[in-house]
C-alpha cells in the first residue's frame, strides 16, 4: 500500500492513491491480540498486503495460525472458498523487529493501552520508518498528541481507532492530533473507504467521540446496580430501546478488567467531586472479569456465553453500597432509561461544544456503526431531538442536583433547550 514515494510528494497523499506495498502492524500479542488480528484480517480482506511485526517468531506463527482458523470458519460457512482463503493469507507476512518497516507507507501500532509503551514504540519507529510515512496508533482513548510528541514528525501521526472485532465492525474513528497534516488525515479517511469501513473524524480528548460519549451510559448502569437495580433489569431496558446487548453484558463480553486498567492508569486525574465506579473495581478485585473468567456482572456455565443472573453480584453491590453510604431502593425502568441515555446525550453535547466532533451526526454514526444503536432511532443526538431538548435538559438538571458533578449540564444543551433548538436540525 503506497501513498507517496517520499515526503516531497505530499500532495499525492492528499488524494490517497492506493497501490501495492506493505502496512506494518507492530506488536499485537498479549492483551490486544484480538484487536491486532482483526485489523490484519480487515486489511488482507480488502486486498492489501500486510507485514506483521511481532516480538518473536513464535508469536508470529501463533498469530497466523489463529487467523488461518478464522478463515477456515469463513470457508465452512460458505463466505469464501479455499482458493480465496489461501489468497488472503498470502497477503500476510511476519517479521521480527521494527527494521521490517523501513520502507512501508503506513504503520498501524496495536500494542496494549499504555502511554509510556506507545511513546517508546513511536520513538523507535521515528528512527526507522522512511520520511513521509504515516504512523498511526490504534488506541481507544489515549492522548495521541503526547504520542506524536515522542517523534520528530508529529505531522505524520494520526489515530485509527478500530472497533472489536475489527474485521467485522464497520466503524473506524480517525483521530486528528493537533499537529497532524491534512494529507495524513485524508489518508486515514481513505483507508476507511478502501477497507469498507465508515470513517468519522474526531479530535483528541480522553475517549475521543465514541468512548467518551458512551462512558456516561456505562457509568450510570454501574451506579444503578449499586443503588438497587439488577444487571438484568438495566440491560433489559437498553435492549428494549433496540440495542443488541445491554451495557453490562457488553462489559462481560469485552472484559471488565479492560476498563479497570484504564481507571487505574488515570487514578491521579480523577476529580474527587465526581462519583467513582467503586462497584466495577470491586467486581474486578473479586476476579469477576466477565465471560473469560466465567463470571462478571453475570455468571457463565461450562464455557458458554449465555448470561445467567448471579446472586453474588447483588451481594457485592450491597456490600459496596453499605461502604459508600448508598441507599438501595427499587428503581423504575423509566429512571434507568433516562439516566443511561440522557447521560450519553449530555456528554455528546459537550463533545460538540468543544469541537471534538464536527457535527451531531458524527456522534450518531459512531453509535450506529460502533455500538449497534438501532438505526430507526437515528443515533443518540437525533433521539434527543425527537424527545425534546427542553425535557432532557430539565431531567439532566434534576439528576445534577441529585447525583452531583458528573451530571453538570452541557452549556450547549442548555442553550438549545432555551431557544427551542436542536442538535441535528
Image (cartoon, rainbow, N blue to C red):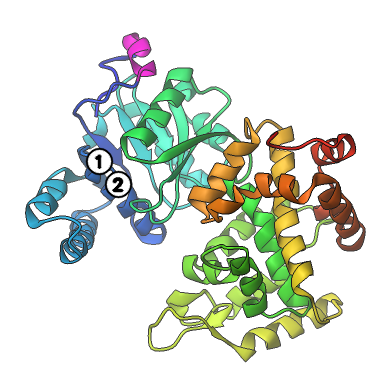
Residue 22 found in image quarter: top left
Q: Secondary structure at mark 2?
A: helix
Q: Residue at x 39, y 82 (%)?
A: 304
Q: Which residues are magenta?
A: 8-15
Q: Quadrant of the C terminus?
A: top right
| Residue 315, position as x, y percentages in the image | 69, 88
- In this rendering, is residue 152 above or below 315? above
On screen, residue 388 versus residue 263, left or right, reads: right
Given the current orientation, which residue lies at the most extreme right position? 401
| Camera-nearest residue between 305 and 126 | 305
Q: Residue at x 75, y 76 (%)?
A: 226
| Residue 306, position as x, y percentages in the image | 46, 81
Asked if the residue at tag 1 contacts the one at tag 2, i.e. Cβ–Cβ closer than 8 Å, the answer is yes
| Camera-nearest residue between 243 and 106 | 243
Q: Quadrant of the N terminus?
A: top left
What secondary structure predominates along the stretch shown in magenta?
Answer: helix
Q: Residue tagged by mark 1?
A: 46
On screen, residue 94 versus residue 391, left or right, reads: left
Label 2, label 1: how far apart the Cα atoms are? 6 Å
| Residue 275, position as x, y percentages in the image | 79, 62
Q: Residue at x 86, y 59 (%)?
A: 399
Q: Residue tagged by mark 2?
A: 42
Given the current orientation, which residue lies at the most extreme left position? 83
- In this rendering, is residue 148 above or below 5? below
Quick check: is 400 in the magenta stretch? Answer: no
Quick check: is 11 in the magenta stretch? Answer: yes
| Residue 418, position as x, y percentages in the image | 90, 38
- In this rendering, is residue 58 above or below 386? below
Does residue 152 appear in the picture of this structure?
Answer: no
Q: Residue at x 76, y 48 (%)?
A: 346
Q: Secondary structure at mark 1?
A: loop
Amino acid at each position: 500500500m503506497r501513498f507517496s514515494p517520499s515526503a516531497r510528494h505530499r500532495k499525492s497523499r492528499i488524494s490517497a492513491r492506493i497501490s501495492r506495498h506493505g502496512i506494518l502492524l507492530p506488536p499485537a500479542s498479549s492483551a490486544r491480540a484480538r484487536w491486532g488480528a482483526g485489523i490484519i484480517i480487515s486489511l488482507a480482506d480488502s486486498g492489501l498486503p500486510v507485514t506483521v511485526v511481532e516480538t518473536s517468531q513464535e508469536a508470529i506463527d501463533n498469530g497466523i495460525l489463529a487467523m488461518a482458523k478464522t478463515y477456515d470458519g469463513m470457508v465452512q460457512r460458505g463466505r469464501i472458498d479455499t482458493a480465496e482463503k489461501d489468497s488472503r493469507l498470502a497477503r500476510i507476512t511476519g517479521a521480527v523487529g521494527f527494521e521490517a518497516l523501513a520502507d512501508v507507507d503506513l504503520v498501524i501500532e496495536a500494542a496494549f493501552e499504555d502511554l509510556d509503551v506507545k511513546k517508546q514504540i513511536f520513538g523507535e519507529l521515528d528512527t526507522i520508518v522512511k520520511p513521509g510515512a504515516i504512523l498511526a496508533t490504534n488506541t481507544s482513548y489515549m492522548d495521541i498528541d503526547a504520542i506524536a510528541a515522542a517523534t520528530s514528525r508529529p505531522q505524520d501521526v494520526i489515530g485509527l481507532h478500530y472497533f472489536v472485532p475489527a474485521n467485522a465492525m464497520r466503524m473506524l474513528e480517525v483521530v486528528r492530533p493537533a499537529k497532524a497534516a491534512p494529507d495524513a488525515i485524508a489518508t486515514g479517511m481513505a483507508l476507511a473507504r478502501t477497507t469498507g469501513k465508515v470513517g468519522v473524524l474526531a479530535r483528541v480528548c480522553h475517549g475521543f467521540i465514541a468512548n467518551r460519549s458512551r462512558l456516561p451510559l456505562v457509568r450510570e448502569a454501574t451506579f444503578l446496580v449499586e443503588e438497587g437495580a439488577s444487571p438484568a433489569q438495566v440491560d433489559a431496558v437498553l435492549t428494549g430501546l433496540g440495542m443488541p446487548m445491554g451495557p453490562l453484558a457488553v462489559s462481560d463480553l469485552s472484559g471488565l478488567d479492560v476498563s479497570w486498567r484504564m481507571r487505574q492508569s488515570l487514578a491521579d486525574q480523577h476529580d474527587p467531586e465526581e462519583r467513582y465506579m467503586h462497584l466495577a473495581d470491586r467486581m474486578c478485585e473479586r476476579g469477576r472479569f466477565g465471560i473469560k473468567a466465567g463470571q462478571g456482572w453475570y455468571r457463565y456455565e461450562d464455557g458458554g456465553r449465555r448470561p445467567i443472573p448471579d446472586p453474588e453480584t447483588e451481594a457485592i453491590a450491597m456490600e459496596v453500597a453499605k461502604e459508600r453510604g448508598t441507599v438501595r431502593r427499587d428503581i423504575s425502568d423509566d429512571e434507568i432509561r433516562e439516566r443511561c441515555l440522557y447521560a450519553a446525550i449530555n456528554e455528546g453535547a459537550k463533545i460538540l461544544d468543544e469541537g471534538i466532533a464536527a457535527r451531531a451526526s458524527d456522534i450518531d454514526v459512531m453509535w450506529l456503526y460502533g455500538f449497534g444503536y438501532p438505526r430507526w432511532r437515528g443515533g443518540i443526538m437525533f433521539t434527543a431531538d425527537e424527545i425534546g431538548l427542553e425535557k432532557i435538559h430539565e431531567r439532566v438538571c434534576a439528576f445534577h442536583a441529585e447525583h452531583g458533578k458528573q451530571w453538570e449540564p452541557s452549556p450547549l444543551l442548555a442553550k438549545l433547550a432555551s431557544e427551542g433548538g436542536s442538535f441535528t436540525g
